[in-house]
Amino acid sequence: MLKVLPRSFSIRNFKCLKELDIVLDKLNIVIGPNGSGKTSLVEAFLLLKLILNYIKGSIMNPFLQWWGYRNAVWRLNEKLNIELKIGFSLKWEPPLDFYRETFEKQTGHPYISLDSVYYNITVSGIGGKFHIINEELYIKDYEIKLRAVNNRIRTFYKDNEIQVTEITPIRYLLELVYGFLKVHDYLPYDEAIDNTIIDIEGNFAFIPSNILKDIPSKNYDRVFIDFGIVCSLVGIYKLIDRMVILPPEAFFRIREPSKPIKVETISPYGEDLASLISTIYGGRLPEHIRSSLEYVLDEKDIDVKTTLTSDGRIYLELIQGSNVFEPPSIPSGLLKVLAIEIALDINSPLLIIDEIENSLHIRAIHRVLDDIRNSDVVLVATTHSPALLDLVKPFEVIVLERKRLETIASRLSRSRELEKKLRKLGVSLGEYLTYIST
């Protein structure tokens, strides 16, 4: 299985964010006054998701989300390009015992582990047309870069281009992964990911063997490094594809009946959540998700199932004892917890929630944060709630501020100085950040 852990996110020239660099922790609670860029940060992640959808061919132009490029670029300046960069680490253990033994025998290693991988994409929408200007994957562990240029992938080692035999024209790095992943569409997602890694490595050679003498570790062979490169490619695809983004309006769209389709992750506005429950769970929730819903409502015998309208659309029903409630009667807070718990259950690497406190009692927020801490998911959530801040550690808080028309980000210190200051003032973290530090 391939595990991906997001570690950083950088934005250039997107909406009110001219230059923003954020190091990601397990929990990242983003605060700041109105207009400081919290929603723009969430939408920058959304842009990454929409770019992948464009590469898949499911949308024509990601910037239509903002009614055109002018509304998405810094200070409405269409001459500027938007740049997004996400850093991550990964670990891949080959599937099946017999393949693991072969892999270890061939490479001398039981698994692939990389600490510092960076994906950088530069885009523009000038002239009303979407353009991917540059796409680069940098594997710092190997000092290797892949760039998609002029319909082919170019490999660089220590900034020097390596001549590699070209097999087939490829427009985008993410397109390469998507093409192979479609072949395994019939498999569960993680199995399809494993098979895609094996297939790409078997069909592409990203480096020649003659550069291995320059790679720092003598224990690496060409096949091992090729697998590391492929895992990095598939890793960024999985990170973006399985990333779950939940804006406040998502929990209104979840109620709407929709066309039943096969899906394995939550769309940014949640309208396919019923289809996801049908695809993964067969229409009924597993017990551990039901227990979270029961905790939030403080009721027993809670369940959610999918059903069809007379014209074949799918929607959710809430079952409470002998009562069945249709979408208009389902509490928004329950739908929010449901979406969050499913994101955790499908091992989404990154969960982004705008205004996490909306529709949730502090009891529900406490449960959700505990479940996230006990998962493999990284959370980025915006909030205006002092009460929520009292449930997290100071170093888990990111403060956004506007200075000279630009947004800057700072993370609260991990030191004990702030904790001592709070005790001296006799206030909570939420009270301090909301009423005193400003």
Image: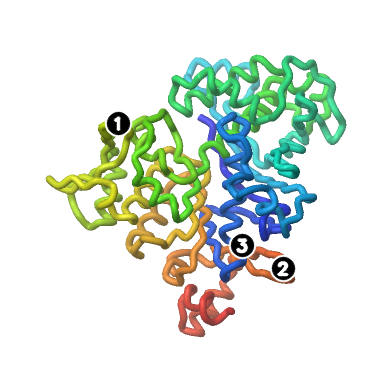
User: Residue at 72% across / 37% down in the picture?
Assistant: 132
Q: Which mark, residue 431?
A: none
- Quarter of the image for residue 41 reads bottom right
Helix or strand or loop: what does disc 2 sit on? loop
Whether pointer 3 and pointer 2 mark residues with C-beta atoms closer than 8 Å, the reply is no
Q: Residue at x 76, y 51 (%)?
A: 78
Q: Secondary structure at mark 3?
A: loop
Res 372 seen here: yes
Q: Earlier in the sequence, mark 1 or mark 2?
A: 1
Q: Which of pointers 3 and 2 lies earlier in the amino acid sequence?
A: 3
Dividing the picture into quarters, in which one does residue 316 lie?
top left
Determine the CA span between mark 1 and mark 2: 51 Å
Residue 280, image quadrant? top left
Residue identified by numbered label 1 = 311
Whole-percent x and y of residue 92? 56, 30
Tell me residue 403's x, y (percent). 71, 71
Q: Nearer the viewer, residue 230 or 215?
A: 230
Side of 179 where 331 appears, left or right: left
What is the residue that sits farthest to the left in this orientation?
Answer: 322
Residue 364 position, x and y percent, is: 34, 59
